[in-house]
Image (cartoon, helix red, strand yellow):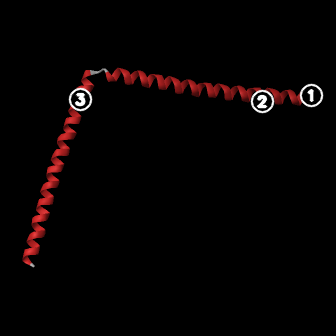
Amino acid sequence: MGPGDLGIVIAFIGVVSGVCVLAGAFAGAYFFGKSRGQRETLQTGRDPELVARLARVEHIIESTAIEIERISEGQRFTTRLLSEKKSFES
């Protein structure tokens, strides 16, 4: 083993160590973020203010859907009347 071979071994060990540290950092960040997200989800699920707010949003969406359906019915009715009026005029 000559002096050039020792440099290659040291460089190889440095690269492998760097890759291992980087992989460990990514794994740690992933699992830390995942556990933090789960913890926040559990805490917000118990918040009564958030639950009430979500219920109000759902009610608003349902009311909006009903009103849009009423508008659609009115448009269909008007379109039908106009098409019948045109057929009587012809």
| Residue beneath disc 3 | 53
Amino acid tagged 3: Arg
SS label for mark 2 = helix
Mark 1 lies on a secondary structure that is: loop
Mark 2 or mark 3, which is nearer the start of the sequence? 2
Q: Which mark is residue 33?
A: none
User: How many residues crowd mark 1 within 10 Å: few (<14), some (14–19), many (20+)?
Assistant: few
Q: Which residue is mark 2?
A: 12
In this view, 76 is above or below 49: below
SS of the residue under disc 3: helix
Residue at the (20%, 32%) spot, across then down? 56
Mark 2–mark 1 distance (CA, rounded to whole Å): 16 Å
**Figure quadrant of the C terminus:** bottom left
Pick whichever of labels 3 and 1 is earlier in the sequence. Answer: 1
Q: How many numbered badges does the structure rendering display?
A: 3
Q: Which mark, by number, is residue 2?
A: 1
Residue 58 is situated, as x and y percent measured from the top left of the image, at 23, 35
Up/down of 62 relative to 68, above or below: above
Q: CA distance from mark 3 to mark 1?
A: 73 Å
Horizontal and vertical percent for residue 66?
17, 45
